[in-house]
């Protein structure tokens, strides 16, 4: 038997993948039906915005989960997804069908190149480098008024149709909710498969003990840069959906506070769990909405919640619930 | 061609010199022991091969190629697998995944996950458990199995008997002898003289970073060897 054959994924891996596919399918159906049960377009619109943020939080959480890197600058890729879409629509004659993959591929390619440098360091140094890169892009967009609209932002006019479908779908809250929801579900399912692949396991090994992985014979730079690029691609998908829905993008989406919010969402939800950051995004935005009605100092409450979660529930909401269920399960058997 | 050759090698951690002109060789299919008390530089021999300790003088050849500053992954690609002290199992991966991880170099050879399971049947039974859920002896088997997955020409084991029950050490002796008979060269870095005697053919004794004794084990008394490692 060849080495390659021996290291291919074993048969038992198929069952969790099939279960995950079933769950993803059910979740997609729920998302498609849900707008029928919600009468308020405002609620649907807020939920849609929340889901685009959930995609950004998922990209940040994926990076933490798969590589241990904490990015303080992931809004760069979200913003790039939005700006590349808007700028190419405005300044080139490219069809939206060509622009959409470019708006994901360009941030991913940039992240890969940047990643080859920044993933050589870890901890605070990595976080600070990502923050620095993000601020560079923020300043470029703010200062480049003629091309990118500067502080005033950029209005984006969509063509009437894309892939044979009317683009009005993107700006109708119910339809866009379905599109963003299903996109998020597909991303989560693909990340589940990636985590179970040989590449995903190698990344876990590198995260756990990079030196050990190198002793075994792996060159570890490329896998870490690839994880950074994949997380950037996910973030950019959020940005693309954001600009398709809003028809407008401003430098706010590139600001470090956007990166900070995504990180808070990931931590509150539980970055070590695939679905944690998305749940964190929903909780964060719901809390922001409700608390904003009560006090203008809602950020202080979010900050206090973050401290509480970090100290008391370091695995985040999803992790805490997961461990609670497991403890109860063990107690039940005993 | 030698698989591993140290010639007057001096290795450092920072400015601290640990190996001071060490010369040793391992040829194809040979079984050698590196003996010595704690702190004499035995592990630094492995760490020099891995590029953890910095070689500042002498000549190091790995797989017949001179390496002035080996990178962490060079030894594995040159056919030398190292089972480190403390085993270093990846805790988030299962037994099977830990084994699969070992095939990094994709060198051709007889070792597959199934072949490892045949060598250590207990690993087949524990295949889907986390690597760190195993006992110390089972973790050592997993570490050896993971190293074998690279189909190495030379297997370097750093203190593999440390913390293991005598019955498990006997099993390791049996396994290492089977590997040796199958043609895999073995370098055993150890203090357990009884274990070394049961596996190796030649030995080197280190003291204060130098080779102070070497030779074939035939005719050397257990007491004479123990004198090198007892305090």
Image (cartoon, coloured by chain):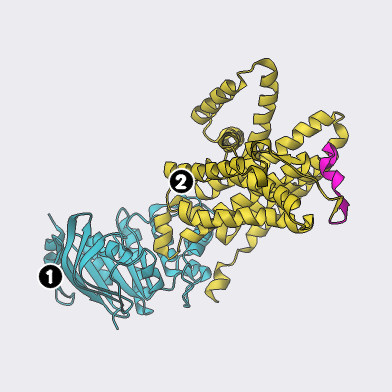
Chain colours: A yellow, B cyan
Q: Is residue A237 above or below residue B183?
A: above
Instruction: Indicate the quadrant containing the C terminus of chain B: top left, top right, bottom left or bottom right.
Output: bottom left
Q: Is residue A152 left or right of residue B157?
A: right
Q: Nearer the viewer, residue A211 or A15?
A: A211
Pointers 1 and 2 within a single chain: no
Q: CA distance from mark 1 to mark 2?
A: 48 Å
The quadrant in which residue A108 appears is bottom right
The subunit letter for the residue under badge 1 reads: B
- Most extreme residue toward the front, as rendered? A146
Residue marked by disc 2: A126
Q: Main secondary structure of the magenta part?
A: helix
**Nearer the viewer's eye, disc 1 or disc 2?**
2
Residue marked by disc 1: B213
Q: Nearer the viewer, residue A139 or A177?
A: A139
* Residue A169 covered by magenta stretch: yes
Mark 2 crowdedness (10 Å alpha carbons): few <14, some 14-19, many ≥20: many
- What residue is shown at x 70% (from left), y 24% (from top)? A289
Secondary structure beneath dot 1 equals strand
- What residue is shown at x 67% (from left), y 30% (from top)? A285
Circle count: 2
Mark 1 crowdedness (10 Å alpha carbons): few <14, some 14-19, many ≥20: few
* Residue A332 covered by magenta stretch: no
Q: Position of residue B220 (x, y in %)?
A: 14, 73
- What residue is shown at x 15% (from left), y 60% (from top)? B229
The quadrant in which residue A98 appears is bottom right
| Residue A203 appears in the picture as rendered | no
Q: Position of residue B87 (x, y in %)?
A: 37, 56
Instruction: Indicate the quadrant containing the N terminus of chain B: top left, top right, bottom left or bottom right.
Output: bottom left
Q: Give the magenta-colored segment's residue range.
A: A163-175
């Amino acid at each position: 038997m060849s080495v390659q054959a021996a290291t291919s994924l074993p048969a038992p891996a198929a069952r969790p993948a099939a279960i995950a596919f079933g769950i993803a399918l059910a979740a997609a159906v729920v998302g498609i039906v849900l707008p029928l049960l919600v009468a308020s377009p405002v609620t649907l619109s807020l939920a849609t915005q929340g889901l685009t943020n959930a995609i950004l939080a998922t990209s940040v959480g994926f990076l933490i989960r798969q590589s241990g890197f904490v990015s303080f600058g992931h809004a760069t890729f979200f913003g790039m997804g939005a700006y590349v879409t808007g700028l190419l629509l405005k300044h080139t004659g490219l069809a939206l069908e060509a622009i959409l993959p470019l708006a994901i591929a360009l941030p991913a390619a940039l992240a890969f190149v940047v990643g080859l440098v920044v993933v050589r360091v870890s901890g605070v140094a990595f976080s600070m480098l990502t923050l620095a890169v993000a601020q560079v892009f923020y300043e470029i967009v703010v200062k480049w008024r003629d091309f990118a609209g500067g502080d005033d932002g950029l209005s984006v006019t969509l063509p009437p149709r894309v892939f044979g479908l009317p683009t009005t779908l993107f700006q109708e809250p119910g339809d866009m909710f379905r599109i963003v929801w299903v996109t998020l579900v597909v991303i989560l399912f693909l990340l589940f498969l990636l985590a179970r692949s040989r590449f995903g396991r190698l990344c876990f090994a590198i995260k756990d003990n990079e030196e050990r992985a190198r002793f075994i014979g792996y060159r570890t730079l490329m896998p870490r840069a690839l994880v950074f690029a994949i997380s950037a691609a996910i973030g950019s998908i959020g940005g693309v959906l954001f600009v398709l829905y809003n028809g407008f993008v401003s430098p706010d989406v590139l600001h470090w506070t956007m990166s900070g919010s995504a990180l808070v969402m990931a931590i509150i939800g539980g970055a070590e769990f695939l679905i944690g950051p998305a749940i964190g995004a929903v909780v964060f935005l719901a809390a922001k909405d409700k608390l904003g009605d009560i006090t203008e100092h809602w950020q202080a409450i979010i900050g206090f919640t973050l401290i509480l979660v970090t100290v008391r529930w370091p695995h985040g909401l999803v992790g805490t619930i997961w461990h609670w269920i497991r403890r109860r399960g063990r107690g039940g058997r005993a | 061609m030698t698989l591993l050759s140290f010639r007057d090698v001096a290795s450092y951690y920072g400015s601290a010199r640990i190996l001071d002109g060490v010369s040793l060789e391992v040829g194809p299919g040979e079984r050698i022991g590196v003996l010595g008390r704690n702190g004499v530089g035995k592990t630094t021999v492995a760490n020099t091969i891995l590029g953890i300790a910095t070689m500042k003088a002498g000549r190091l050849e790995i797989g017949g190629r001179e390496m002035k500053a080996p990178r962490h992954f060079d030894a594995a690609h040159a056919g030398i697998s190292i089972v480190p002290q403390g085993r270093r199992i990846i805790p988030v991966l299962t037994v099977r995944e830990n084994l699969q991880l070992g095939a990094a170099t994709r060198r051709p050879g007889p070792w597959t996950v199934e072949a490892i399971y045949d060598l250590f049947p207990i690993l087949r039974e524990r295949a889907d458990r986390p690597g760190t859920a195993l006992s110390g002896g089972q973790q050592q088997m997993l570490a050896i199995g993971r190293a074998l997955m690279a189909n190495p020409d030379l297997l370097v084991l750093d203190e593999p008997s440390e913390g293991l029950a005598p019955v498990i050490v006997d099993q390791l002796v049996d396994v290492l002898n089977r590997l040796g008979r199958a043609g895999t060269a073995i370098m055993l870095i150890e203090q357990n003289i009884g274990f070394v005697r049961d596996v190796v053919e030649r030995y080197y004794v280190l003291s204060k970073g130098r080779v102070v004794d070497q030779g074939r084990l035939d005719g050397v008394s257990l007491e004479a060897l123990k004198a090198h490692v007892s305090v």
